[in-house]
């Protein structure tokens, strides 16, 4: 069988995306309500930080605008998993019902085919709010804005996104081995709430866990330091892109390992 190149997959994804968006636009009221709900959720987080800093000038050395930057950074970095990998939430249903077998007979990459089937357009509202929050914090901290800084921001946002994609993908893959996989996936998803806080506010035990076991510190804290505190960047920040790629490849391998051994009646 001829190996498919990136251009082929891009063309296929564009067609699948067009069909998915058409189906979603046929239920416009549901789409509008969902977008408004997501916006209010993000706004509530913004207000929570504002209220918190009315009573405290800083949290363990982190000021209001630095925390706002972390919050915006985490929202933007979570957007790819929200938009592109939302079908992970349906994986367990397909596996337990036996419907997953249909993905195993297509002459394209199994992981790509399954994930590309759903695009959660609501995540674009989260992206816009996150970018706005970053701009708001950046301007109030009077940080220098250069092409190099912008490139660093983009690279480390991609890095952070890979980490969250890794956590969700690996957690979703648990359904290939256990019937209670929803709780694994839900737990991994809830951990994202801790990503908007600096790792230094936690105890040493949780710093270790959130860095090396459940690496949510790489979703916002470590990557954002290259912008917020460029004169005091730890080695883990510079290693973030490497970790992000390694973590993603590992999660992909785990997902494919389970998928390729799928029996057709659930695992």
Image (tube, rainbow, N blue to C red):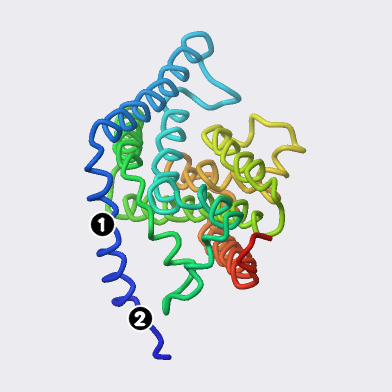
Residue 185, x across and y down, in percent: 61, 45
Residue occupying image coordinates x 36% and y 23%: 40
Q: Label 1, label 2: how many angstroms apart (C-alpha)?
A: 22 Å
Residue occupying image coordinates x 23% and y 36%: 28
Near mark 1 (Cα within 10 A), the count class, few <14, some 14-19 or many ≥20, is: few
Q: Is residue 128 above or below residue 213?
A: above
Q: Nearer the viewer, mark 1 or mark 2?
A: 1
Residue occupying image coordinates x 42% and y 38%: 75
Pick the front one: 221 or 122 = 122
Q: Is residue 248 above or below residue 193?
A: below
Q: Which residue is the extreme one toward the top?
A: 55
Mark closest to the chain's N terminus, 1 or 2 = 2
Q: Which residue is the extreme one toward the bottom?
A: 1
Q: Which residue is labeled 2 in the image?
A: 5
Residue 50 appears in which quarter of the rendering?
A: top left
Q: Which residue is labeled 1 in the image?
A: 19
Q: Secondary structure at mark 1?
A: helix
Position of 10 compared to 83: left or right?
left
Circles 1 and 2: CB atoms closer than 8 Å: no
Near mark 2 (Cα within 10 A), the count class, few <14, some 14-19 or many ≥20, is: few
**Image quarter hosting the C terminus:** bottom right
Residue 83, x across and y down, in percent: 38, 48
Residue occupying image coordinates x 46% and y 39%: 74
Position of 237 compared to 15: left or right?
right
Residue 250, x across and y down, in percent: 61, 65
Q: Secondary structure at mark 2?
A: loop
Residue 162, x across and y down, in percent: 49, 56
């Amino acid at each position: 069988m001829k190996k498919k190149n990136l251009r082929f997959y891009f063309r296929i994804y564009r067609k699948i995306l067009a069909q998915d968006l058409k189906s979603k636009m046929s239920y416009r009221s549901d789409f509008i309500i969902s977008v408004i709900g997501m916006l209010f959720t993000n706004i509530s987080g913004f207000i929570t930080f504002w209220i918190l800093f009315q009573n405290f000038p800083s949290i363990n050395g982190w000021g209001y605008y630095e925390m706002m930057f972390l919050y915006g950074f985490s929202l933007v970095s979570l957007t790819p998993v929200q938009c592109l990998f939302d079908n992970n939430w349906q994986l367990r249903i397909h596996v337990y019902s036996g419907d997953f077998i249909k993905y195993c007979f297509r002459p394209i990459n199994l992981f790509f085919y399954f994930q590309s089937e759903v695009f959660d357009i609501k995540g674009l509202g989260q992206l816009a709010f996150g970018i706005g929050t970053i701009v708001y914090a950046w301007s109030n901290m009077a940080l220098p804005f250069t092409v190099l800084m912008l490139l660093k921001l983009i690279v480390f946002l991609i890095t952070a996104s890979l980490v969250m994609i890794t956590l969700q993908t690996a957690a979703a893959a648990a359904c290939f081995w256990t019937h209670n996989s929803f709780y694994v996936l839900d737990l991994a998803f809830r951990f994202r709430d801790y990503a908007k806080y600096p790792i230094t506010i936690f105890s040493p035990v949780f710093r270790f866990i959130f860095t090396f076991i459940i690496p949510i510190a790489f979703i916002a804290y470590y990557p954002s330091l290259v912008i917020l505190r460029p004169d005091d960047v730890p080695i883990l920040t510079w290693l973030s892109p490497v970790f992000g790629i390694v973590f993603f490849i590992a999660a992909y391998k785990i997902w494919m390992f389970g998928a390729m051994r799928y029996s057709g009646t659930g695992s």
